[in-house]
Image (spheres, grey):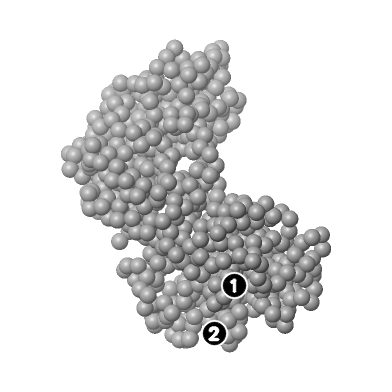
Amino acid sequence: MEIYLDANATTPVLDAARAAALSAMAEDYGNPSSIHSTGLKARALIEAVRERARKLLGAGNGRLLFISGATEGIQTAVLSALHALRSRREAGDTSAELLLYGATEHKAVPEALKHWNELLGLSLQVQAIPVGRDGRHDLDWLRQHAPRAGLVCTMAANNETGVVSDLAGIEAALQGSATFWLVDGVQALGKLQLDLATRRIDYAPFSGHKLYAPKGVGLLYVREGAPFTPLMAGGGQEGALRSGTENMSGIAALGAVLEALQDGKSFRDHATLVRFRDRLADALREAFPGLVFNAPLEQALPTTLNFSVPGLASRLLLDLFDAAELRVSGGSACSAAKAQPSFVLQAMGLPDEQTASAVRLSFGPAADEAFIIEACERIRVCGETLRANCLAPGGGNLPLPGNGISRYLLDGECCWLVADADKRQCVVIDPLAGLVERLAQQLRCQGYPVVGVLATDASHEAACEALRAAVPELLAAPASLVRQLPLSQGRSAWLLGDERQVRVAFIGQASVEELGTAVQPATLLAASRDLDNQITSTPSSQLAGPSTPARSLDPQSLHELLKAHPDALVIDVREPFEQRLGQAPVLEPAVAIEAVPVSRLLNTLPAWLAMPAERPVVFFCRSGNRSLVAANLLKRLGHEEAYSLAGGLALWPQRTPAAADPALYV
Ligand code: PLP
């Protein structure tokens, strides 16, 4: 069962909300603008939901409009404020020079400011309000700039860190300024008491899907008397402020959520949520020694925990959690080759290592005790899995003897570890400064004497020295696990295998021409840079040039392929820690699965390439990305029958219920 801990991205739909939406679709399906009885019923429903929202948000005499979601609300508010600023300017008031937004604001806000500023020809200066290390706005800065501001945008609570803004402090800083004030209430809905009308807030947008309503419905609060310009003109719905036939099922569902908020039965109170948060925080600290929280918990929503485990990339943690069926999100958006650090954490002044390893865990206020207990248990298992795979930077790792070639990748740069279990020896080739700690940890878990820390060129020498210094107890007299092939300008390649059959050549950045006759057409070439995630090539594949991409199979095509080829190989290319935690696909007809992580493909490629050409090899992983890399590689190296499972395990209809059954694997 999945444990969904990404509520700040979106939530599931509350049962009562689903029922209300279905009823609005099936029974009360009227158009609220119609004057017949069916229409009147729909109108009554809308107004009842609006009244409920008015009470819950403390909207007083302000306007509450039903909209599609916060992004629309933000556009409408920004357009309204900027249009009013233009009128003020035309009337001779030029005091507004700045459009200000919190540096950690959701992208929708600065993008809307820039968009409408340009479209309305205002040319005001769009500027970020700095935040402190605690994620809160710099109120002194705001006080200084407020007199020149035309619009100030500050969120009530941050989506990445949960940091709750000091709205009273912001309001005080705006005193004396004629600026408009937008408060993005998206993450506060149902979690903070807002009492909108008691403040000078002009606009506050909300999205239903962040609080158990479906996507596509939201609310915009507009203070009584605040300027308003419709974003959408048309049939005059919502008092002509927002035209377009109302999203009745969405509004009905939102109404059911608001009702649940009022009756207090479905949602936990603040103290309970704090208790849940503390349990999760304890479980995280215990599972990942050295973990740091990226925002002070006591100033954040109790439903959001943003943390980093120094030394562990957020991508690895995300894969680990996902394999344990714990859905969390990166504090940073990850791209395939290079992690993009979170601008929110950067704005808070966190060091790069911390932003690159951030993870956000968020739950909704409808979470119950059993859910939190299960989440804590899975977090514990994740910690255990890290230690069993020698990945815990905080220590406590278990011994992990290794064999063969493993690749370590950092921002497109590769380092190689070659271990020989029979000889109990290993060498490291082209270590990287950013990987020294990780490699040292791996070498200690492996426990083999290190008979070489080798470089293909001088750029790796410093990292070689650092690695040697990190594991002095493991350094042994040089031994010939790999052979040196001197190249020009002091560079080298390192060859594995005997002269007649070099299995692998670690070539650094040398070209195949430089290797000359020292390698054979089928020698696997392992480079020290791999920005396109090619993993390896051979002299003959380089000669052959590009090949067509491998095919991705949907479940039905895979079923047919396995029926036609019972000898097909099915390979799980996820990392061992994911395989240990994760599920495997239930294949029909049943076929044994081989576990070969992408980082260790070089060990098995020669055997696969030696198989009969018609024997299919199907790779799978979590999302279909890594398996496609592996399938393309095998195809490029000459085995045409290479496939990837489309969409990976995430889209696979049937999976083993618990951790991978060892019987499924060969
Ligand atoms: N504001 C905040 C704080 C958010 O978290 C989000 C969504 O992530 C938005 C605005 C945009 O909401 P939507 O995508 O529902 O329009």
User: Decide: marks 2, 1 in contact (CB < 8 A)?
Assistant: no
Q: Residue at x 44, y 51 (%)?
A: 394
Classify mark 2: helix, strand or loop: loop
Mark-to-mark CA distance, 2 and 1: 19 Å
Specify whether tag 2 is near ligand 1 (CB below 8 Å). Answer: no
Q: Position of residue 136 (x, y in %)?
A: 43, 29
Residue 223 quadrant: top left
Q: Position of residue 566 (x, y in %)?
A: 45, 86
Q: Residue at x 56, y 19 (%)?
A: 97
- Front residue of 268 and 279: 279
Disc on the earlier residue, 2 or 1 = 1
Can residue 280 be seen in this snapshot?
yes
The nearer-to-camera label among 2 and 1 is 1
Q: Residue at x 28, y 46 (%)?
A: 279
Q: Is residue 110 above or below residue 582?
A: above
In this rendering, the count of numbered labels is 2
Pointer 1: residues within 10 angstroms few (<14), some, or many (20+)?
many
Q: Which amino acid lies under the numbered mark 2 shown in the image of this protein?
A: Arg
Q: In the displayed structure, does residue 534 sit left or right of residue 29? A: right
- Front residue of 358 and 46: 358
Residue 602's tag is 1
- Front residue of 418 and 60: 418
Q: Position of residue 586 (x, y in %)?
A: 37, 75
Q: Residue at x 22, y 49 (%)?
A: 369
Q: Position of residue 554 (x, y in %)?
A: 46, 72
Q: Is residue 165 above or below residue 544?
A: above
Residue 264 quadrant: top left
Residue 615's tag is 2
